[in-house]
Image: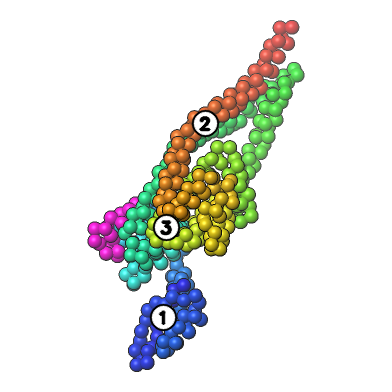
Amino acid sequence: MEFRYQVLDKSKNLLQGMIEADSVKQARLSLLQQGYDVLLLESVRERYQKMRIGDVGVVPLKEKMLFVKHLSLMIKSGMLLDESLEALYDSATGRMKAILHRLIELVKKGSLLSDGLSLFPYTFNEFFVNMIRVGEKSGSFEKNLVNLAVKLKKDHDLTSKVRSAMMYPAIVLFALAGMGITLAVVILPKLLVFFKSLHVDIPFATRVFIWAADLFERYWYGALLGFAGLIVLTAFLNKISRTKIVIHWAVLHLPIMRSFSKISNLANFCRSMNLMLEGGMTIDESLEIMTRATNNALYHQRIGYALTEVRRGIPLSEALSRYPAFFPAIVTRMLKVGEVSGSLSETFAYLAEFFEDELDALSKNLSTILEPALLIVIGLLVGFIAMAIISPIYQLTGGIRR
C-alpha cells in the first residue's frame, strides 16, 4: 500500500514523497526511524477516493479500445503522457471526455495514470488498471498498452460476432412477438365475440385461445409490468452473491448458452493470464486480479480456490485440474507442459487463440443451430392458431349442412 507523506528533517527542511508499507502505523514508524518529524501521512487510495467523482454512465468497449490504441501510438511516437491525453481529449465525446478531463488534471499534478483510472472502476476494471500499473512500475508502459489494446480488440471482435450471430434469432422472435400482439389487440377481440355466439361444441384449442385472449384483454398491462419486473428482478438478483451463483450456474448449463459461456470464460482467462504474465506479474498476482476481473461467479470461485493452492506451492495445472467441469484436460495438460518448459505465458497465448477460434466457429454456426428450433416453434404456434380459428368454423358449417 502506498502512502503520501510530508515530513521535517533534522534541519527543519520540508520534505514530501511516497512510501510503501503494509499499514499507516508501519509507514509512520519507518519515517520516525529515519529521524523525520511526520506532519502528514495519508493513504494514496483513500486520498483518491475522496477526490473521486461519481462513476456513472457507460463507455462503449470500442471507445476504450481506441483510447488505449491511440494512447500507445502517441507514447511510441515520443509524446508525453499529459500531451497524449490532451490530444485524445480534443476528439473525445460524452462520458469519455469527462474521464479524460479528470485524468489530465491528475497526471499534471504528478499522479500515475493507473491511479487516475482506478477512480472509475465501472469503466476500467481491475485487469485494465493493473496492466497499466505494472507497465508504469516495470518500465514496459508502451508494451503493456499495446497488449491491452490487443486484448480489448479481441473482446470487441468477439462481442460483435456474438451480436451478429444473435441477430437472426432476435428478428424472428421480434416478429413472433409482433404477430402475437397484433392477434391479441386487433383480431382476437372480433373473433372472440363471434366464437362465443356459436351454438356448437367449441374445440379444446379454441377454448384455450379464447381463455388466452380474455386474459390478455383484461390484464395486458399486468403482463407488460410483470415482464419488465422480471428483467429488473433478474438484474437485481445478479448483484447478490448467493443468487448470482444460481443464475451463472443456469447459464453454464442451458443448451447452447453453456458452450458460449464456458468457451468465452476460458478464452478470457487464458488471454488475460497471458498478458499479465507477459507484462511482468507473477502467477499469484495474476490469479488474484482474475478473481476480481472474472464476471462469472463460478469461475471466480474456482480461480480463487486455485490461487489458494498456488500460494501453498502447488502448480497451477494441478490446482486447475481439480475442476475438470470448468477447466478441461487440454488446459491443464498444456499448462503442465508450459510449467515444465518455463513458457507458461506462451502456453496461455496458444490456449487463448484456440478458445477464441472455437468461439468464432460457434458464433458462425449459431444461426444454423437455432434455425431448426425456431422453425419448429413458429410451425407449432401457427398451427395452433390455425386450428383454434378454423376448427369451430368447420364445425359450424358442418352443422348447417346437416
The residue at which mark 1 appears reads as: 5
Please tell me which residue is depicted at 37% across the width and 67% down the height of the picture.
137
Q: What distance separates the C-alpha of mark 1 from that of mark 3?
A: 32 Å
Please tell me which residue is depicted at 51% across the width and 81% down the height of the picture.
25
Looking at the picture, which amino acid does disc 3 mark?
Answer: Leu
- 28 displayed left or right of 100: right
The residue at which mark 2 appears reads as: 369
- Report the magenta stretch's main SS: helix
The residue at which mark 3 appears reads as: 277
In the rendered image, is residue 41 in sight? yes
Question: In the figure, 1 relative to 291: above or below?
Answer: below
The answer to which quarter of the image holds residue 18 is bottom left
Looking at the picture, which amino acid does disc 2 mark?
Answer: Ile
Q: What distance separates the C-alpha of mark 2 from that of mark 1?
A: 62 Å
Measured as percent of width and height from the top left, residue 259 is found at: 53, 40
Residue farthest toward the top in the current orientation of the protein: 402
**Disc 2 and disc 3 in contact, CB within 8 angstroms:** no
